[in-house]
Image (tube, rainbow, N blue to C red):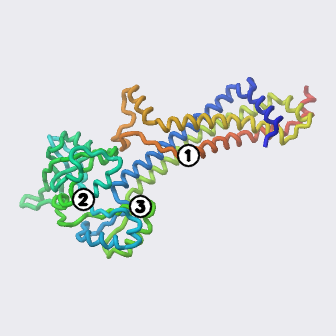
Amino acid sequence: MFSKLERKIAFRYLAAKKRGFGSVISWVSLIGIMLGVATLIVVMSVMGGFHDTLLNRIIGMNGHVVVYHQDGVITDYDFLIDKMRQNKVVAARTTSIVPIAEGQAMATANGNSSGAMIRGIRMSDLAAKSASGTRIYGKQLSQIRDGELVAGSSLTRSLGVSMGDNISLVSAAGATPTPFGTMPRIMAYPVMASFFMGMYEYDSGYIFMPLETAQKYLNIGGGATHIDLFLRNPEDTSAVMAALGRLLPDGFVVRDWRDLNRGFVGALQVESNVMFLILMLIVIVAAFNIVSSLVMLVKDKNKDIAVLRTFGVSRRAMMKIFILSGTSIGVIGAFFGTVLGVLIAVYVEPIRKFFQVLTGRDLFPAELYYLSELPSKLVPATVAGIAVLAVALAFLATLYPAWKAANTDPVDVLRNE
């Protein structure tokens, strides 16, 4: 693609102290591209880690497809679950179908109170869903009996309770009418286990209990508030929803995880796209610096260009010389930026902890970001795409200076010498 002469001249110009690689503008261009690429890789990796971690944890505890009834309670859920499992489309795509009894309550203990989501579930189903990535303290889930609770670790700390202590639950669900008005339902249960998922929303606001206990507390008889279906592939919801639409009688509503988290998923995607565009400006500014550096190089080497043209160097060869000279800055910057970005993305959590200790401040509060640690997910295709895009911008930045050099008239230049 490039001849030996073109490479020799291009790298000689690149190494020139006055206008080439040794110039301040060239260094600014290289460092700008390097920092831009590194920042893009780190930000996109962290955004990808946020997206996957939050969705996996939110979707992991909530069904990929959820079945509700317009009356609020599903009384014959065992019969419906059997029908779903007999359906070939549903059976082939689901790993489990779980009845849930859910409601809101106020949890109080030791003079402390906090809002909580009560979720009744069979302990065998909860154990299966929390098998990976969730720490359980106290009794094992398989040992939890009717009338016992499993609370989030942050919630137990805020209420000041230990294993075996009682938590009082106050709920308007199943409230009792009296001559003096409606009295909220108040029940006390012992906390026999706590869990840590690493997601603040769950750790600080969820209480799990056996399904039968929740049914009694929420006063819904032997019913469930909804049925969760967990799929082998979370993206494959359309076929299951269509099959359930044909299978279930009137009055049932079927929704998937995209519908239930539409605002959240959309916000993550928009934020990721906007951050990419904003940070890409760093690389674009660095590319403009390459333009100015090469324009000054062309002006400085006008006489050399004229002499080369009189010696028979073609216009195309002159273009290739300056394209190679400028693109080399982009390639070097993209390479070191990629290495730096990958290293930071891989060790982003230790780096965060180091600066947190150094500054003495919580740089990643779980209350704000919902996660207890900074996630990162390196996608090789994204890393390669960012590096290629940076080199492409550097290449585009060389076209005008290279065209200007190729169109230099040697007669006019040498006449003025």
Residue toward you, 233 or 45: 233
Tag 2 or tag 3, which sits nearer the N-term? 2
Task: Read off the residue under disc 3.
Answer: 232
In the image, what residue occupies the spot 43% across and 46% down? 50
Quadrant of the image occupied by residue 182: bottom left
In this rendering, would 37 be left or right of 212? right
Which quarter of the image is occupied by the C terminus? top right
Query: Is label 3 in a helix, a strand or a loop?
Result: loop
Q: Position of residue 411 (x, y in %)?
A: 92, 34
In this rendering, would 108 be left or right of 339? left
Query: Is label 2 in a helix, a strand or a loop?
Result: loop
Residue 122 is tagged as: 2
Measured Cα–Cα span from mark 3 to mark 2? 20 Å
In this rendering, would 11 be left or right of 259? right
Residue 91 is tagged as: none
**At label 2, which amino acid type do we have?**
Arg
**At label 3, which amino acid type do we have?**
Arg
Tag 1 or tag 2, which sits nearer the N-term? 2
Residue 380 is tagged as: 1
Q: Position of residue 221 (x, y in %)?
A: 17, 66
